[in-house]
Image (spheres, helix red, strand yellow):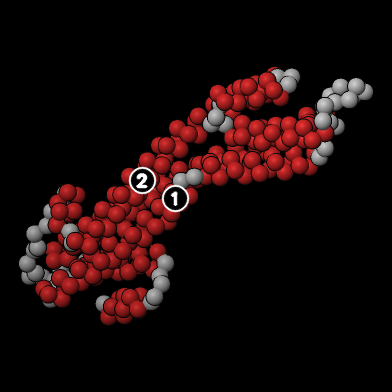
Amino acid sequence: MDAWYARLSALSQRRTADASEALLYIFGTLVLALQVQEGAAPVAGSSSLVGLIRDTSVVNLCVLAVLLALSVVSWAIILKKLWVFRTVSRQTARFLDVFRRSTKFSEVQAVCPSLPASPLVGVFQAGYTELNAQFRLTGPPEATSPRPTLKSLAAVDRALLRASATEIGKLERQVTFLATIASAAPFIGLFGTVWGIIDAFAKIGASGSTNLAVIGPGISEALVATAAGLFAAIPAVFFYNHFTTTMKTLAAAMDDFALEFLNISERNFT
């Protein structure tokens, strides 16, 4: 037991500790709790989750309230982004179909207002605007060259790259907050657990016993915070990875579309 006390004391003096060290702290206290002494008076406690939350400390209640708020925000972002990416996927497929069947960029431009969610629309409009700007600079086509000519294909490429970066930024909105929740929620819950463990040690000191009946309810209340932190973090991690993969796929689609747009422009206007 003295070795455990020394270990726990050393952990408490460190300014920073990773999750594995903190979990070692918690499991160490559980080992102490299992060293039952005879004759200790049982402490009344609730076995239900609602009862544990009701009986917990003010600090743990604040931790649980913060985690609940983070979980609500996380699920709001998740549901919104699921709807957004579904719309983006559907409209992108429709836009590509129109783009590849059309013979003129003006026909594609006429369809763009009906497909505002697709990032390819923003990329196309940036390229189309740059083409028209260059056509105005070069003037009307000559009789020997009935079609307009590009002044700089590199300028069109830069316009497409800028538009792609802008569209990726739109897709990333709020998704990075999921990563913040996924990283912070377990540690917020761990803070509540450590606080509950401190309270359990205080009860050990007050009762002079390490009987499980004395500190068991306090440890149960403390572990609720860790469970709440994981409840908030796990969906955030899962959907952050899912959305990141989706955005990478869309970014690749924008790169492919930009190359296709440049090929058509070079073939028809140079």
Which one is in front, 54 or 96?
Answer: 96
Q: How far apart, in angstroms, are the residues tagged by discs 2 and 1?
A: 9 Å
Mark 2 lies on residue: 73
Task: Give the structural element (helix, strand or loop) at label 1.
Answer: helix
Residue at 13 percent across and 66 percent down: it is 214
Judged left or right of residue 252, residue 143 is: right
Residue at 32 percent across and 69 percent down: it is 25
Q: For the residue carrying disc 2, how many other residues have a C-alpha within 10 Å: few (<14), some (14-19), or many (20+)?
A: some
Which one is in front, 99 or 128?
Answer: 128
What residue occupies the far right of the structure in this picture?
144
Please, is residue 140 above or below residue 23 in the view? above
Q: Quadrant of residue 83?
A: top left
Disc with the residue nearer the chain's start (2 vs 1): 2
The tag on residue 177 is 1
Residue at 86 percent across and 22 percent down: it is 146
Residue at 45 percent across and 43 percent down: it is 239
Which one is in front, 17 or 217?
Answer: 17
Query: Badges 2 and 1: C-beta atoms under 8 Å apart?
Result: yes
Q: Could you tell me if residue 185 is visible in this image?
A: yes
Image quarter where the N terminus lies is: bottom left
Q: Position of residue 153 (x, y in %)?
A: 80, 38
